[in-house]
Amino acid sequence: QVQLVESGGGLVQPGGSLRLSCAASGSIFSINAMGWYRQAPGKQRELVAAITKGGSTNYADSVKGRFTISRDNAKNTVYLQMNSLKPEDTAVYYCKIGVATLFNPTYDYWGQGTQVTVSS
């Protein structure tokens, strides 16, 4: 069994910053790709940023230059540093982590979601 716990969301003014964290725990054999997604009201869930096991990253065009994804493999944790936040960044943010256990191949686990609200 694998659990993901997200933290770091909240209310911030435009131009402000937040840092999201997502930690995986449980019967982990290895962790592969990690990513952050977001879903705004009335919209589909979209990829924000992803990072491979080797550290390669990719970002949605809308967040390039403002958001940075990183990972700490020793802590089984992925981070999303969000700077220069805009009202259109308001959404529920979800982490997704690919986890292999001793008896099962890689499976994508999702965090519970954390609300990010950018408003003055």
Image (cartoon, helix red, strand yellow):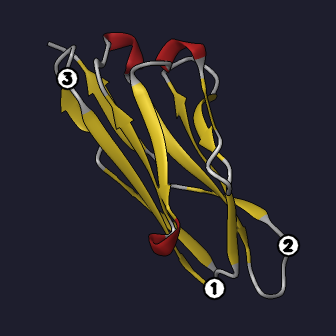
Cα distance in 3D space between marks 1 and 2: 12 Å
- Number of callouts in the render? 3
Q: Quadrant of the C terminus?
A: top left
Q: Which residue is mark 1?
A: 27
Q: Which residue is mark 2?
A: 105
Task: Inspect the image, locate mark 2, and give the three-letter code of the amino acid beneath it.
Answer: Pro
Vertical arrangement, residue 75 with respect to residue 109, above or below: below
Among the two numbered marks 1 and 2 on one chain, the one whose residue lies closer to the N terminus: 1
Q: Secondary structure at mark 1?
A: loop
50 left or right, relative to 72: right
30 left or right, relative to 24: right
Q: Residue at x 44, y 34 (%)?
A: 68
Vertical arrangement, residue 22 with respect to residue 88, above or below: below
Q: Quadrant of the N terminus?
A: bottom right
> Within 10 angstroms of label 2, few (less than 14), some, or many (20 or more) residues?
few
Q: Which residue is mark 3?
A: 16
Residue 14, disc: none
Q: Secondary structure at mark 2?
A: loop
Q: Residue at x 49, y 55 (%)?
A: 71
Cα distance in 3D space between marks 3 and 1: 37 Å
Task: Inspect the image, locate mark 1, and give the three-letter code of the amino acid beneath it.
Answer: Ser
The image shows residue 34 at horizontal and vertical percentages of: 62, 51
